[in-house]
Image (spheres, rainbow, N blue to C red):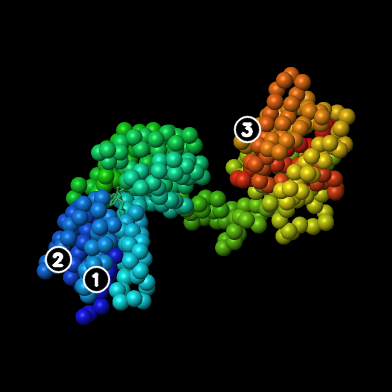
Amino acid sequence: MSKGKILLVGFGPGSGEHMTFRAREAIEESDVVIGYSTYINLVKDLLRDKEVIRKGMTEETDRAVEAYEHAKKGKTVALISSGDIGVYGMAGPSYEVLFQAGWKPGDDIEVELVPGTTALSSCAARVGSPLTHDFCSISLSDLLTPWPTIARRLDAVADSDFVIALYNPKSGRRRQQIVEAQRIFLKYRSPDTPVAIVKSAYRDLEKIQLVTLKEMADCDIGMLTTVLIGNSSTFFKEGLMVTPRGYANKYENITGSVKAGEKRGRSLSLGLDGWKASIKEALSTATDATNIEAILEAKAADFELSIEEIFLALASSEESSQDDIVLAHQLEREEGLKAFTRFIKESPNQDSPMNLTIGEKRTGQTQLSAFDANNVCFSDNNIVLDNKEGITANIHTAAIQHIWTIEKDGITQSIWLLDKKGNSLLYTYIRRDS
Ligand code: SAH
């Protein structure tokens, strides 16, 4: 009996010209072709003399099981999917089914994955060049993913200024997901952000709508639509959607001369090394009267990074020298909490009111100036800050994940309690204005 084979084939957006050579060949060499009805219809010209098994949308694992059964009988079976079968497709479920059945690579049944052009590439090509800078994809389908997970990812990428491709944006039953996605994006992005809505790219009923983020959810969107949302530099021009590659940071124009301070073929002056150096430089001129904490917080706010990233830049050993008067040190957690207590109880400004800051400039902060050391109390679970007007602030000790000190001329200036993302929960510092 001949060896069985499973071909996992992505045939691209759905037009013959955009199918890869190998995808066509793979379908042609198979005995059995299994796929969702719409997919079978899209490749029907290649299916003469083949056993064709049409499956419904929700019978995903059935499709994989059936492919395995046929392959065990020595058949070559193609499991087909539009786009790339590894992208929101059958490749993952197929491997899961195979592993469950005890299959391993090198066994009697060979498995070959044939990649295809995924919807985000084909849809992007129809509207210009929206994916020229960092992008990601999120599926709005909540059939297999809980909505809170989807919402958390939408929030993270909206905030991070990725270009984004939304797969499965809407169906007959799922109509509100795109509305929620729009609401989350509008928290961070301009209502005028360019959006391309591409339906059935490279297929008969192709439809393209170039709109803005505020109009997105009201547009014609369905099961066969991919939505591309631009980043803060994406623009529309002459009916095309383009995201700049980023050269504007470095060159006067795309073909022009190199900007002052930048070098061809080298990282930007604000590349990794240059950025670290810029933080050190900003603090190198600090005098006794300088509010170091304000500089650190301003940098975090300007660059939209956690305060810990600023500390890490300051602490990076490269280029660090004896002359650095402001230094950042990370403390181990237990040791850090003790150091924090000590700093409060023994601080040099013991006699004057304590300075405590809850939060930081970037994330929002509260200054608590009328607190003396005796009004700070530590319990197992909380740091409780109490003032005379009866206002109590509570910091959960469990939320404190990283602790840093900032030193100048060998003297601790401030201690920072950070959460797991590296944002400040609370810091205390020595007064410089008294
Ligand atoms: N494996 C496929 C994705 C399957 S999920 C791929 O790699 O492209 C199904 C979703 O893909 C649809 O809801 C739609 O968002 C997108 N999609 C697939 N083909 C498309 C096409 N021709 N035009 C626009 N979107 C498409």
Q: Which amino acid type is shown beneath numbered disc 1?
A: Ala
Badge 2 amino acid: Glu
The three-letter code of the residue at mark 3 reads: Gly
**Which quadrant of the rendered structure holds the N terminus?**
bottom left
Q: Is residue 331 visible?
A: yes
Quarter where residue 209 is shown: top left
Earlier in the chain: of badge 2 and badge 1, it is 2
Give the SS element for disc 1. Answer: helix
Reply above or below: 368 against 281.
above
Q: Nearer the viewer, mark 2 or mark 1?
A: 1
**Residues packed near mark 2 inside 10 Å, few (<14), some (14 to 19) or many (20 plus):** few
- Circle 3 or circle 2, nearest the eye: 2
Sequence order check: which comes first, mark 3 or mark 2?
A: 2
Q: Residue at x 86, y 28 (%)?
A: 352
Looking at the picture, how far across and down is residue 415, in whole percent? 76, 42
For the residue carrying disc 3, how many other residues have a C-alpha within 10 Å: few (<14), some (14-19), or many (20+)? few
**On the image, numbered disc 3 is attached to which residue?**
364
Q: Residue at x 24, y 50 (%)?
A: 57
Q: What distance separates the C-alpha of mark 3 from that of mark 1?
A: 60 Å
Which quadrant does the C terminus fall into? top right
The answer to which quarter of the image holds residue 319 is bottom right
Q: Nearer the viewer, residue 207 or 35?
A: 35
Earlier-in-chain disc, 3 versus 1 = 1
Is 50 located above or below residue 269 in the figure? Answer: below
**Pointers 3 and 2 in contact (C-beta within 8 Å):** no
Q: Which mark is residue 71?
A: 1
Which residue ends up furthest to the left in the rendered image?
49
Q: CA distance from mark 2 to mark 1?
A: 13 Å
Residue located at (79% from left, 44% from top): 339
For mark 2, what is the residue? 51
Q: Secondary structure at mark 3?
A: strand
Q: Quadrant of residue 343?
A: top right
